[in-house]
Image (cartoon, rainbow, N blue to C red):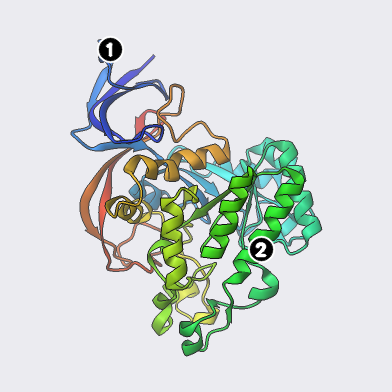
Amino acid sequence: MTRIAIINGKLADPAATDLSPGIILIEDDRIAAAGDFAVPADAETIDAAGLVVAPGLIDLGVFATDKPAFHFGGITRAALMPDQSSPLDDAGLIRQATRAGKPDFWVHPIAAATRGLKGAELAEIGMMQAAGARAVGTGRQWIADSGVMMRVLSYASGLGLTVITHAEDSGLTGKAVATSGETATRLGLPHAPACAEAMAIARDIMLARATGGAIHFRLVTTGAGFDLIRAAKAEGLKVTCGISPAYLFLSDNAVTDFRTFARLSPPLRSEDDRRATIAAVADGTVDVITSSHDPRGPEDKRLPFADAAPGMAGAETLLALSLNLVRDGHVTLNRLMTLLSANPARILGVNGGSFAAGSAADLIFVDPDAPWIVDSGKMAAQAGNTPFDRMPVQGRVRRIMKGGNFL
């Protein structure tokens, strides 16, 4: 048995309240202990040199596996959305996806809820779970047929799987590419009211109540949406929600001058809604922060705004941007790691995101104050389509460990 003791680190334990000095003992590919104790005589020691040691990030909902970007950003596990060139609606495709990151990171596929993600016929969810799927997803689309969505929730509940859903009523959004408001009107962009999100959330909460199923709203971006999530949680329903940094730090003003790198799905919201996302993180309504990593090349982005594909490359900037929440006093660093690691692990049912004994030894060594500048032309990702281009940020992952081995 190989034993490694990581010393002189500041432990960002999601189960603890505050950052504290301590030791992490690793046995083979698992964490054996974390805290203040004597280093065993037979353990190899690794000096963390005062860096923050945290669980590897678990990115709940990426659209592409991207080794260089994941390593730069400290992502050791990624839940892959079913929206692929061939939708992940078949056990063979799920099995293939689980192998996509080996040996560099873990990939946890999200099974398509319906065949071809068309929202009509249920996919073989049970077979996909047996092949390695960790959740069920509606992809970039909302399932408009309430009967179909109810069956998805019922079936997934029987298998112990969470349904990850997109929250926009498609009857309202249609071909909209922006949120209704001054910016969309001034630019002449097809737009839809922000209430499309709350309407979708309200229906799906009702169905979750009726079925007893667990539902995760991958991105909630409006104050009205968060109010519904808060009420559902207070009721004791199995409801969780996520957000990505773009909605925390950008409003719909970012699409001024038809900036396609800021074309996202759902679209950026008003400044009031942006502030509501910050408040929802601070009060614990938000469970997960995800990168929504979706690298898009010039062929997808160098187009008229309405024709450009939505999405941004977010893996590299996920941690650095999220650390702004700590510096601004909205959350502690330990709480941030709950949002980036522990809660995603719980929703996916994987043994990671924690310093608990027996948890996978997937760790990152972070310098939270290291300055750098986001540069879309130099990103490690497959494409540098980020709305944060040229923004100064702080926080760099210096080393990354997967299963007790440095990468």
Q: In the drawing, what numbered circle is on residue 40? A: 1
Is residue 328 something that shows in the picture?
Answer: yes
Q: Residue type at mark 1?
A: Pro
Q: In this view, does 34 lie above or below 81?
A: above
Q: Percent x, y for residue 263?
A: 48, 73
Going 42% across and 57% down the picture, which residue do you hit?
279
Q: How crowded is mark 1: few (under 14 residues within 10 Å), some or many (20 or more)?
A: few
Going 53% across and 85% down the picture, which residue do you hit?
189
Tell which circle, 1 or 2, labels the residue nearer the N-terminal end.
Answer: 1
Q: In the drawing, what numbered circle is on residue 267? A: none
Q: Residues within 10 Å of mark 2 (few under 14, many from 20)?
A: many
Which residue is label 2 attached to?
Answer: 200
| Quadrant assignment for the N terminus | top left
Camera-side residue of 215 and 226: 226
**Which SS class for mark 2?**
helix
Q: Left or right? Give the position of 146 relative to 360.
A: right
**Which SS class for mark 1?**
loop
Is residue 222 something that shows in the picture?
Answer: no
